[in-house]
Amino acid sequence: MNQKKTLTSYFTEVFSGLDYGEEFIFTKVKNKYLGLSRGELVCAIRKLIDELEKMGLKRGDKVAIIAANRTEWVMTDFACMFLGIVTVPIYNSLSPEQIKYILQDSDAKACFLASSYIMDKVLAIKDKLPELKTVVSYDDFDEMNRVEGVIFFSEMMTGQEDKPKKCMEELMKLAEKVNEDDLLTIIYTSGTTGTPKGVMLTHKNIYSNVQSCQKILQIDRNDAFLSFLPYCHVYERTAGYYLAIFTGAKIYYAQNIDTIAVQMPEVKPTIVIMVPRLLDKMYNKVLRRGDDLKPIKKKIFEWGVKVAEENWDRKSSLKWKIANKLVFEKVKERTGGRIRFFVSGGGALNKKIGEFFEGVGVSTLEGYGMTESSPVISVNRPDKNKYGTIGKALDGVMVDFAEDGEILVKGDLVMKGYYKMPEETEKTITNGWLHTGDIGEIDDEGYMKITDRKKSLFKTSGGKYVAPAQVEEVLRGLSYLDQMVVLGNGRMYVTALLVPNYEELRVYAKGKGITGSNEELISNEELLKAIERDIKRVQSGLGTHEKVRKFRFLSQPMSPETGEMTPTLKVKRKVVEERYKDLIEEMYYDI
């Protein structure tokens, strides 16, 4: 493979050996999948490079991208790369004030965006951003709604050449000027506390991560990715975008998270980069399918589910083979029937759910990482998958543990630092070792487990430490619970704020002869007592000091829009504790 650890050299080397006419990125438009060929991408990048230079942009300048996954995102990303321009991806769910902070802090000189909704956010703050000279819209608006000073991407790209070989030769010359230690991107971590930090990742950081992931996953031109996580999340950007592009695989864009179930059978993906929450929903949907079946078929289905859960690691057994024919094949058809594996990251995978899908015949490789490590640190192996672990460290990644159990990481994947935050960088990286902030352990075979976030560990008034993530993972065993926040710092006992999965809760309540609106269900005394019994049951393996003794239901889900979660769906504990302090105090009145 190429010796220069840059994504630009990687791009020219890989694309030069592939068919320029082959379509490889697909977007669903009016029930049809429109494809972008490699040649079209190469020529679009070359054209966009000229346009960026006309804007006065040069090496080291920053360009923001605020858009959902789309082909224009890819074009902009690579055009910036070849010119040495640093991309700053921004979640489109952020508020105008949050977007303003990132644009200001990053010194962005141009902003590429999609939709009038995002346009309105940016135009509302543009006057306060003197560095921001250019705004480019991926979407065209009616002439009547045209905004002064906004450039349409489509107009910029008129007159694009259709000579991929010639364009590639020019890209090769530009690639020679890019060095492995050049800054590739600044990704602002959403942060569950404090100010967002700009993580500086170089070409070498991302290149090494893609290479190490490929050694394990062995992606090839027969693979197809269904992409739904945003590219501004480095997990999808590295594992679902760069990895696919540099291995000749195809990418299909999901229209949104709600259309995944419809699009899976359409595109027949082999790999989907997942988050645990979606797998939870898929699991519950599979179980609910049995409710609508006639008695005999329902019994067969329930038997099949039991076989999947109990025989997930014994697929050679006659029982599994019968269940596969009668039940599992139908479940796999709904995923398109070609899945090699799901990759799960961004949170803890419920071991039971992982084993269930394995039992059905769909492997889920749980991994671990963070933005500061480009991001993948470890992942399970397709040939040896240990559920309940985050897998083994990637090749070239050194792992150590601090005295308190914190995972430390060293290697080419470790970020350059935090943008304009040297003190924060020094706190996070010492002697080349990245302090992850996660407490973990490792077994004899090198497979790791995360036991908690270092910062989220709390101590009860009795002096006992509690790892809330472990307790929350236990509560996730109840299918009718969707979100939970375990509390108890400095208190006599542990409590929890819960958000139900109302669809599941309604089924659960109906089985007990209880019906009503959402509000009526979460205040029904009989139902609350049943839930309390369930919580006691699933907590039987926890220490006395770890067990949730009281709980309250929240009236609405936590989300990035409410400010209680980050864009990557991590709970902002301080925000939650402040917002629901009266409800929390209620749980400690009667001691």
Image (cartoon, grey):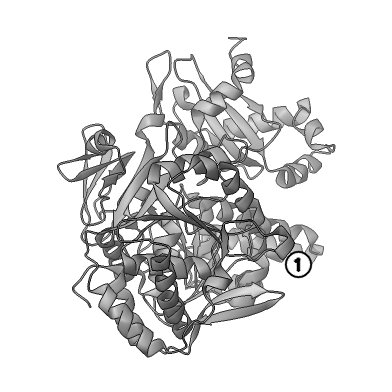
| Residue 78 appears left or right of 34 | left
Q: Nearer the viewer, residue 470 or 347?
A: 347
Q: Secondary structure at mark 1?
A: helix
Residue 405 in the image, given as x and y percentages of width and height = 27, 36
- Image position of 276 (left or right of 8): right
Q: Residue 334: in sight, yes or no?
A: no
What residue appears at the point 81 percent right and 31 percent down from the top-left corner? 520
Q: Quadrant of residue 150?
A: bottom right
Q: Position of residue 209 (x, y in %)?
A: 30, 62
Q: Is residue 335 above or below residue 495?
A: below
- Residue 150 can be seen, yes or no: yes
Q: Amino acid at mark 1?
A: Lys
Number of residues whose C-alpha sits closer than 10 Å to that of mark 1, classed few (under 14), some (14–19) or many (20 or more)? some
Quarter that holds the C terminus: top right
The foreground one among 360 and 115 is 115
Q: Which image quadrant is residue 385 in?
A: bottom left
Residue at 37%, 61% (x, y): give it.
Answer: 57
Q: Position of residue 535 (x, y in %)?
A: 60, 32
Residue at left 44%, top 76%? 47
